[in-house]
Image (cartoon, helix red, strand yellow):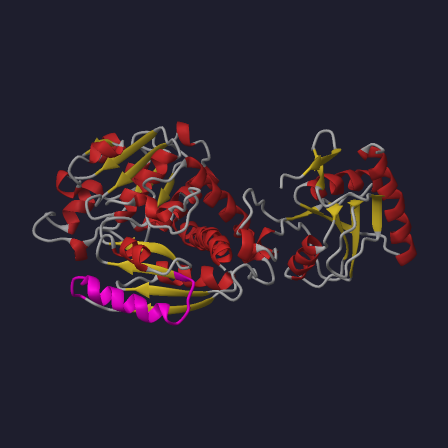
Amino acid sequence: MRNTESLIKAMAGQLRERLAERGITEPMLVGLHTGGVWIAERLRQELGITDPIGQLDVAFYRDDFSRIGIHRRVQPSELPFDVDGRHLVLIDDVLNTGRTIRAALNALFDYGRPASVLLAVLVDRGGRELPIDANVVGARLELPASQEVQLTGPELLQLVIQQTTP
Amino acid sequence: MTGTHIQLDPQGRLRHFLTIEGLTHRHLTDILDTAESLRGVAERRVKKLPTLHGKTIVNLFFEASTRTRTTFELAAKRLSADVLTLNIATSSAVKGESLLDTLRNIEAMQCDMFVVRHQQSGAAEFMARHVKPHIAVLNAGDGRHAHPTQAMLDVFTIRRHKPDFPNLRVAIVGDILHSRVARSLIHALSILGTGDIRVIAPRTLLPAQVENLGVRVFHRMAEGLCDVDVVVMLRLQRERMEGALLPSEQEFFQQYGLTEERLALAHPDAIVMHPAPINRGVEIDSRVADGPHSVILEQVTNGIAVRMAIMSITLGHHARSAGEEA
């Protein structure tokens, strides 16, 4: 697989195009903990955005609470800007079922009413269970369900594909 | 108190929250970290999370309370649970039978969590032993025994100001004997590895063998307050006192009241805490309670996030076992 840095550069290129098409000049980036935050920070540098990124942890919005409870190591969410009327770019490392993005959208709307939300992901591995799609995709991967893809960081961002423990 | 492990499931995770005793450093930091993530919710437009949507929480208060009851209520509501508060005023001693009857009746309303405050030590644990397996029980104060959510909000408040527990000096002052807050706080501080835990009180207001809890005992403020980073003042619990444990409130204030002069003995940026309600002029001077070192109102705010954390963690662990049974 191409290295993660080149995928992020590809994402930045696509994101510039999507923003230009929509006439968005001041997007606010929101990364999903943890990998999405690392990528959001890199995209912020690539796009030369001066505003700080937002950070979102969706642990309290997940739909699997009644099966697995609260995830450990939940991190504080922080959106250091007013969401109302802003154009947001939601950023995550891996897009799979779409359930995390559903949770993230619900969380965002508890902060205010954004003008629009774009979704940018490093990897789209298919397997959607909800009507959710990304506007910006670093790479598309066809992976068997027995494998998972993870982003490690934050110093050196690297995609790791491994066998899931059954 | 026996059976502290009833609050843990076979994997060692919190099912109930009854006492700090027997918990690990990791249990405590998980609660504190989760609470840290929940703290920001109050500053958002929608001060609510969907986590406990569809759950029913019943607050059973057999003993008067304002802060604890309202913050538990608010915590449940901010997690989208349905919440019902029953103030069951009773002065008679607990009869196992009647408590059990109350429990069965409320269980029949299909609830998921009991928050219990009771004047009898061990009441919450009794409930935890008898509830159906899908129900979580939180102790909101039982007699002189424990007040674990208060202890957690206290260490949460301390950690936000002074996170270095091994190098921390904490003095707990006043009526240690009647204080479930003090007992739970001492346990929490020692699990977190606090370097120096002190209690300052007259002999009549100290439990026997208090040293066994790992604290240093002082009888004089001038000695005990020296260089401390945190001063925790306790409420003088006149309602729990029998006989002449105290000469008079005035004399107590003269010897153990926290005044600006005495606070000057502590570290210059020491924080002052109190579980509230405060008795102004009995254990603490108004100038200190309302002064720059006081974090008493911050404790109240933090109490909501900490109780939200404990509710979501314990109910989350029930969630799985209920699913496995189904």
- Is B93 covered by the magenta stretch? yes
Q: Position of residue A99 (x, y in %)?
A: 68, 55
Q: Say above or below: B132 vs B189.
A: below
**Magenta stretch?**
B91-113
Q: Is residue A163 left or right of residue B161?
A: right
Residue at 62 percent of width and 41 percent of height: A166
Q: Position of residue B34 (x, y in %)?
A: 51, 47
Q: Position of residue B256 (x, y in %)?
A: 21, 42
Residue at 19 percent of width and 44 percent of height: B177
Image quadrant for the N terminus of chain B? top left
- Is B120 covered by the magenta stretch? no
Q: Is residue B321 left or right of residue B214?
A: right
Pick whichever, B187 or B301, lies toward us.
Answer: B187
Q: Is residue B296 left or right of residue A38?
A: left
Pick whichever, B209 or A148, lies toward us.
Answer: A148
Pick whichever, B295 or A160, lies toward us.
Answer: A160
Pick whichever, B75 or B136, lies toward us.
Answer: B136
Residue at 27 percent of width and 43 percent of height: B183
User: Is any part of residue A94 visible from this angle?
Assistant: yes
